[in-house]
Every structure is written in structure tokens, then in C-alpha cells.
Image: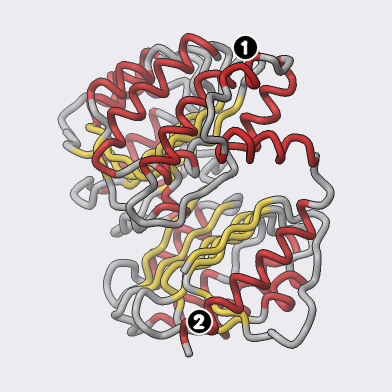
Amino acid sequence: MKADLVNLTVKRLEGLRANRDSTESQDVRKLVEIILCSESDVRAKILDMDVEMRERVLQEMLRKECWDRDGNKRMFNKMLSAFMLLLSPLTRSLDLSRFFSFCPKHKMNSAMEEVLGWIAIMAPEVNHLILEDSSWNDDRGVEPLSPDVLRSLSELDKLSRLQAGQSLIAFSDLLHLCQTLPKLRFLKVFHASKFDPEIPLEVIKRSLGHLRALVCTVPFFVGKNWLLDFFAKLPNIEVFNNCSFFDIDARDFKFRNEPYVRFLFFTLDGSLFSHHDIVMLRLLNPKVTHLMVEWTLDRSDTCRKQDELLKFENIEALSLQNVQSAETVIGFVFFYGKNLHTFILAGSIGDDLCFLSLNLILKLTPNLKTLSLDRVILKDDSEPLIYSARLTDLRWKM
């Protein structure tokens, strides 16, 4: 029964994707298929393309995604060979999160180092780089960035945005990396490990002062005074964190004339965040645009907290993780859907399937561009799916 439901969902979403793809360039998609499916050497075919076509084919190839949890070594090697040839001085933005989904996990760091080396040589103007995004690959585990990868990243001196959302980085390495990338404005990593609270904040300011967004978890042992000093030294930074604000209240933030925080993450269990924490974070950060909520097995006292999470006013990107109830999903989408451009939904990690009306979701999100569904079954199987012209990125996995 479960397999039938999954197969039906796959067919219906593939139909919706085909509807969307019909508006895209047929030639580019055909070239990508030839490159990835051909058993012969495609080097000559790629080199015959003009630089504009190579860039279009590159970006289309990077949309491919592997749903195998262990990657696909054969396909990754083919994509890697093509990637080296498709890079050009025209390349400015690279989202490699799906590209690396083909890479076997044990080869991830060495593959990253090789790819970054080619980018530095063949595409030196790249200013926006996504290595991994935990929103899509949260089941593949968290890995530290190796010294070689960090060294290769430091050579991409045009970077203004760097996302490595599923990676660990030592805090001292993070400071050094930011020092070597003077144009960097946005940095996202999963967690800054080996955190040393004894590092003077003046040193941190010199390393991070040019950033506008630092998206990473803040360790729980960081106390109130350190956190407040951090905000004071770096008043323009946007901080995404999942630590409790302890006994901080609005008066502690009197030095901040303008709240800059845009990203907030909440884990809803019985103890991690109190209702007071959520209220204070909402009041202190009225300009939050990105909200991520995760549920755990301990669901005590979550109803009151959920109600508080429905009071932000500027949410444009919403991520709901480990959701068991379709009613919960609809409640969030009903409140925030009108302004959403990104919606990421992952059902319960357990055996309970999340049955959802995709037509209702699309109806409530008229401006949606990116939709990711994980562990979700469509229940409106007797109706044709609504096609949204704005929807440009649709992902589904089980």
C-alpha cells in the first residue's frame, strides 16, 4: 500500500515537472542528456559550444539530483568530467548541492577540493557558491570541511556568498576563511565547532566585520554576556541560531537601533525553547524573513509555541521539518503562504506518512518559486495538479 502511494506521488509530480519544463529550452536539455548518457567521449561536443551555450548547459546539468542515499559514483564521474569543460569566465553562480548528491560520501572532501580547484582556474569570477544545503541533504550526515577544502575556498577571492549548509568548520578556521575572502557578505555553515569563547571579540570583529549574514548554530555554552557583546561588536550581521536566549529581554538590546536578524530556527520539544524564548525572539527580530521549525518526539507544550510562531509578519521562506500533522502544515501555509517564495516540507521521520493536498498548498502560495517535499504523500489523486507558472524548482524524495 505504501509503495503504491509513493509511486502515484512520483508520477503526479513528474507530470507537474514536465508541465513546467515545457517552457524551457529543449536544446539545452537534450545536450545535457547526451553528455550524461553517451558512452563515447563528449569532450569535442562540449568544446564546440560557444561560451553562452556552455554556461546554459552547465546550469541545467547542475539541476540534476541523485535520490540514492549513497550517491552514484559512475554518474558523478561523468558529471565531474563535463563540469570541468563547461566552466567558463561567464560563470558567476554555482549551486553544487544537487551535483554533490551524486558523490559517494567517503569521497566528498576530495571531490570538493578538486571541484574548487577547477573553479579557481576556469571560472575565477564566481561570486555565489553553494556547496551543500542542509535543507535538501539533511539525511546524508554532517561532515567537517577538510583543511584542503578550506584552502581551496580561500582562493576564490571574488566570493560574496558562500553556503556550506551541511558542513562543520572549526571557529578559528571560520575566522581565517573570512579574513581571506574580503568580499564575502553571506556565509552559511551548519555549525562552528571547537568554539573558543576566550577569543577576543575585537579579533572576531576584524575577521567577520565585513559580513552581513552569518548563518550557523551558536553553541549552547555561549552565555548571555558573550552573545550580547557579539551583537554589539557586529551590529549589521544577521545571525541564525538555535540556542535559547536564556534570560535576555528587550532592554538588553537597547544599543541596536535596527534589528537585522533575518533567519530563525526553532526546535520544538518540551525543553529546548521556552514560550518566553520564542516571544522574545519574535519581538526582538521583527524583520525575520526565513523561518525554520523542527518538531521532535517530545511534543509537550508545543501548541502554545506554534501559535507564537504564526505571528511573524515578513516570512518569505518557510521550512517545516519532521511534521506529523497535515493540519499543522496547512496552518503555517494558510498564515504565511501569500508571501512565500520558498517552502520546504519534510514529514515525520517515523513510519507515519504525511498526507497532503498539493493543490491546496499551491493555491495558498501564489508566488511560490521553490517547493521541496520529503516523506509526503499526495492525497488529491483524483484531481489534476494545479500548474503554477512561478514554480521553477520542484523537488520530491521519499
116 horizontally vs 42: left or right: left
Counting every numbered tag in the picture gives 2
Q: Position of residue 324 (x, y in %)?
A: 45, 82
Give the quarter of the image for residue 242: bottom left
233 horizontally vs 372: left or right: left
Tell me whether circle 2 and circle 1 mark residues in contact (CB < 8 Å). no
Q: Which of 224/127 is in front? A: 127
Q: Is residue 349 positioned above or below 283 on the image?
A: below
- For the point 46% across and 65% down, the residue is 293
**Sequence-wise first label, 2 or 1:** 1
- For the point 31% across and 42% down, the residue is 227
Q: Position of residue 116 (x, y in %)?
A: 41, 21
Q: Amino acid at mark 2?
A: Cys
Q: Position of residue 297 (x, y in %)?
A: 30, 79
Residue occupied by mark 2: 354
Residue occupied by mark 1: 89
Residue farthest toward the front in the current orientation of the protein: 40
Question: Does dot 1 land on a helix, a strand or a loop?
Answer: loop
111 horizontally vs 210: left or right: left
Q: Which of 321/212 is in front? A: 321
Is residue 73 visible in the rendered image? The answer is: yes
Q: Is residue 8 positioned above or below 211 on the image?
A: below
- For the point 40% across and 16% down, the residue is 117
Q: Position of residue 312 (x, y in %)?
A: 60, 63
Q: CA distance from mark 2 to mark 1?
A: 45 Å
